[in-house]
Each structure stands twice: as C-alpha cells, then as structure tokens.
Image (spheres, rainbow, N blue to C red):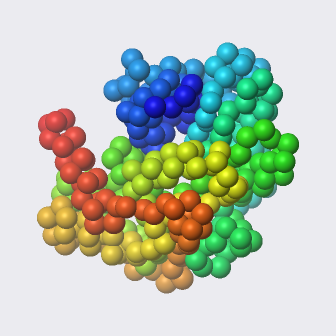
Amino acid sequence: MAEGVTLLTGAGGFIGAHLVRRLLEDGGEVHAIVRPSTELGRLSPFAERLTIHRIDLSDRLAIRQCIRAMAPRRVFHLAAETRLPPQPDFTAARATAAIYLQPALNLLQPLAELPRPPAVVVRAGTIAEYGRAALPYRECARAMPATPYGAGMLATTEAIAMLAPRLPFPVVTARLALCYGQGQAPSFLVPAMIDACLSRRSMTIRRPHDRRDLLHVDDAVDALLHIARRAPHGADLDCVNICTGVASTMDEVASRIEALTGCGEGFLSRAAIEDEPVELRSSPDLAATRLDWHPRIALDEGLDRTIADEHALCTKAG
C-alpha cells in the first residue's frame, strides 16, 4: 500500500486510465489532474474511489494551490498531446513549448517548493524523441526528433535534466515504445485493424513495411510503477527506454490480427508504397540492467488479450 497521496496527470488518457486502475488496486489515495475539457469515460468505473481535479496545467496558480493542498508523495506525469500534425514547421515548433515544456515546469516547481516534496516523479516520455537516431535507440545516443511531438517531448526531457540538480526528488522519464491494448482510441493503427477484422470491413494499411516496437499497456504500467518504487532508492536514472526491443512490420502485425480474429485475408489490404520503410525500435538493455525490468507480454499474447477485450465490448454493446 502506498504511503500518502499519489498524483497523476493525464489520468483520462489511454495509459493513464490503466495506471489509475492499478494504483487503486494496490491501495492508497489517488488524485488525478485532468483538463476541464477531458472526457472521463475511461475513469467512470473508478469515479467513487478517485479524486479528480479539473485544472489545465497551463494555469500555474491553480496547479500551485492544488499541489499545496494535496502534498503528493509520488507523481506520475502522463499528460501530453500525442496527435500533433507530423510535419515540421515553425508554427508547430513554437507551439511545443506551451504544449509540453510549460505544463511540466508548472507541475514540477510547486512540487519542489513543498515542505515535504514527493519521493519521486515519473514522467511518460516517448520513442518519438529519438527520431532519426541510430537503431536500436539507446539512452546515451543523440536524439534527433523528426516530428513536433518528438521535439517537444525531447525539449521537456532536456529541460528537466538541466533542473535535476536543483530538484529535491528524482524525475525519471520513461521513454515508452508504441503502446496498445484495451481502450485505445480507434484512430490508432492496432485498434483500427482489430476493429476492421471484428466488424468484417475493409481497411488499407498504408505503410505495411514500417516496423514498430509495440508494447502492451499492462507492461507499460508495470514499468511506470516499477520505476516509482526503485528511483527513490538509488536507481540514479533520468531517462530509460521502456520497450520490447523487437520491431515487427505492420504487415506482420496485420497477419497476426487476421489469424487471431479468424477473419481471414482480404479485409486488411496492404498499400503498395515506394518510400523507404521507417523503423522505430529501442534497446531495453538499460531497463534490464539498472532496473531489473523486462516486458512480460509477447505480441501474440497482447494482441489476443486486446482482441478478446474488444470482442467482449462489441458483444456487450450489441
């Protein structure tokens, strides 16, 4: 059972809602900061056991007042906009400071000023921070983000690293691989493919040869909790990859989904493309050696779980 209050940002999101469930199962008092506009459907099963604060992280005064009243003992910072347009331009570059950096600073400063600061802050980073870096992505390599999302998240990672000597608690950025699992929005590729197969409708995979390191959300949550337990006791890490180290092609993933759903071939078509395939694959070595953390859910098992969950939801809705 956790001592004191645990605070989450981004609790209404895909990973955040799964983390809320685990925290409540483990016991302890859980508070969530969500934007006033956030739809809370994912949190509805926990509404009576969770304290929700509807505050925008851009509101420095409101965040400061909330944190002073709450005085959390551990913090998970998951709030981040993941669906920015991918094209780099000056407008997007300017926007990233307000979207990623300022909210993180608005959160960390009042935490650092508490008479009893939290024991640890765990932040969800992203594999997109690496971009054009050499494969497999390693924490010691120079990151070269290729998208506004990756650049904004990396800028925040670097700013926190700069502030680390002045902070009275460790901040660990978990650079998550591409997560999937129950409850993910259907606009993402894996749930879109599963939905197409379960509903027997056609869908075209536009970049079938791209490779992605896919991480089941339960493994992601396990890693975040593991970091929170280890970091205050000498883990001495500011950034760590949370990943499988394996990057399947989207063609391979589609074939596995076709087989696991029993829909057969024909519903998921593959586009013919001439561009060079893009691979996103991180090394899990540092997490293994420094944190003794390893992913437990292989891709077939994770897809099978996700398909079973989505099938159950479809059956219930029908």
Q: Residue 250, how many percent across, how many down?
A: 39, 72
Q: Residue 12, how many percent across, how many down?
A: 48, 33
Which of 217/231 is in front? Answer: 231
Q: Is residue 60 visible?
A: no
In the rendered structure, the answer to whether residue 180 lies left or right of residue 8 reads left
Q: Is residue 295 above or below residue 121?
A: below
Residue visible at 16% across and 36% down? 316
Identify the image quadrant of residue 102: top right
In the rendered structure, the answer to whether residue 267 lies left or right of residue 154 reads left
Which of 266/264 is in front? Answer: 264
In the rendered structure, the answer to whether residue 276 lies left or right of residue 26 reads right
Identify the image quadrant of residue 23: top left
Q: Is residue 143 visible?
A: yes
Q: Residue 215, how many percent across, how many down?
A: 43, 60
Residue visible at 78% across and 32% down? 112
Which of 237/43 is in front? Answer: 237
Residue visible at 63% across and 27% down? 72
Which of 180/163 is in front? Answer: 163
In the rendered structure, the answer to whether residue 275 lies left or right of residue 88 reads left
Q: Residue 305, how many percent across, how many down?
A: 26, 54
- Residue that extends furthest to the front in the rendered view of this protein: 233
